[in-house]
Image (cartoon, rainbow, N blue to C red):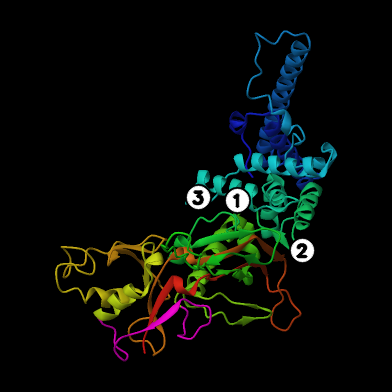
Amino acid sequence: MNFALSDLDAFRSVEEYVTYQASVRSRIQELDAAFTGRSFDVESREEWADLEAIDKRASDTIAELRARTERLTRLAANGSTERYQAPSVNVRNQSQSHVPENIFAIEEYRSRSSSDESLHQAYRDGAMRAIERMRFPHPDARPDEHRADMERLLNYKDTDDRQFARHIILTASPVYERAFNKLAVGSPLTAEEQRGTQLAMGVTTTGGYLVPAAFDPTIIPIGAWTSINAIRATSRIEQIVGSNKWTGLSSTAVTATRAAEAAAMTEQGPTLGQPTIQPTKVQGQITYSYETGEDRTDLASEFARLIAEAKDTEEESVFTQGVGDALGTATNPIGVQANATGTVGAFTPLATVGDGVYAIADVDATYAALTTRHRSSAIWLMSRSVLGATQGFETTGGRLFGATVGYPAVGVQDVPDSSGFTGLRLLGRPVYEAPSGKDTADLAGKPLLTFYNPSQYVIVERIGMTVEFIPNLVAAGGILASGQRALVFHWRNSAKPISVDGGRRLCFT
């Protein structure tokens, strides 16, 4: 983490100055330890001077703000507050007095709280302050949206004991972020950094280190960077904390009928269901040389970006073609275009009209087969190959695609962004690209396209990606070091339709 005097200009509370000063002092200690018994080099001497200047200004500002608070308190005690108003930079709501000045000092929350209820509220308030000052390293990040998403998770998805709030407080700490970067490059940690990583490890039962919140793709859904991931962009996303299973509610439609006066009621539904989705593990390993760690000070954030790209790529494939096969005691995801006609729990299959032939009649039949309830919100998902074949059916003035220009009258395909939207509408409904979708030359029984209501496809994400650092890999033979380190990572999620009637998969017969 880089420090600058100008950073202090953005702070608006004593707590922010205290937190920043703690990080500055930790860096001062770290710098001193690196040059024990010898003189600083030029660069380190300049950094030391800058850190001391920042520390002094922070101390002066903290003292000034606290003195102003004490002055206002005395005026209030004398009944003389009518002409005075505390500056917003210095006054916090009384209900948040249980939050420490250093919001990342998680061990202080309990000592300031008189009950479990106030402790859990303190965690929530502290996490909100951490989110307010969080910086997102990726250039495609949308800070306001990410902060709103995390606030929603805190308010509606967190456990009773505020596990997610504690996750944010621990992993958004400047000390933890700095320690995480050091672990990536194999540098030694200070005592404060060692303690911070140990505290964060206590949030997960799986061992390893939690990824800093601003880097974590299970918390910050920045979206695909190298992959088109239409299914995640359009589907229903459920994030869970402190649980290994999501339970939803599905229902058939309710039918209303007319009747004569005083006639008995008749049962008209709905039929209720409780679909469950259990997240399964996705894992990987990044291997890199000692020299890479020495040359890249931003290695941890770069790893987070690469892992997020891998996450998008894996998800696009399995959320498109997955068949729900067994994975230990759980099952893998069932894809929107589950790669087998008979996949149990997949959207309803529909056979092509002709044997092994894709024709314009199949488009009309697929559209008509989806019930009106789902059709009004439905989208098309298909590969570029199938989309091209479908465009070839358009021979008269835009009946399929509603266009009057193009070849022959299908409109112009936009280059899709990460959402996969092609810019086209087929029979009035949006067309999305599935990079892992099948093409018209594939085998019998495989889906060509899906016409479905995306709200009926649910992705369940267990919050928190975990990593472990292997400081020294062993070369072949198991004796000598290979000169490499490794980062091992994993997260958990899964997905499937919650109503098989919510979509139609057109498959070759």
Q: Mark 2 or 3, which is nearer the eye?
A: 2
Label placed on residue 214: 1
Name above or below for residue 221 compared with residue 115.
below
Q: Is residue 344 magenta?
A: yes
Residue depicted at x 62% and y 57%: 300
Q: Tell me the amino acid under the disc marked 2.
A: Thr
Tell me where residue 473 sits by quadrant: bottom right
Q: Tell me the amino acid under the disc marked 3.
A: Ala
Tell me where residue 94 sits by quadrant: top right
- Are dots 2 and 3 in contact, CB under 8 Å? no
Give coordinates of residue 406: x percent, y percent. 17, 65
Name above or below for residue 318 compared with residue 422.
below
Residue under numbered circle 3: 141
Mark 3 neighbour density, 10 Å: few (under 14) some (14–19) many (20 or more) = some
Asked if residue 229 shows in the view, the reply is: no
Q: Which residues are magenta?
A: 338-359
Label 1 to label 2, Cα distance in Å? 21 Å
Q: Mark 1 or 2, which is nearer the eye?
A: 2
Residue depicted at x 61% and y 51%: 153
The quarter in which the C terminus is drawn is: bottom left
Label placed on residue 205: 2
Label 2 to label 3, Cα distance in Å? 29 Å
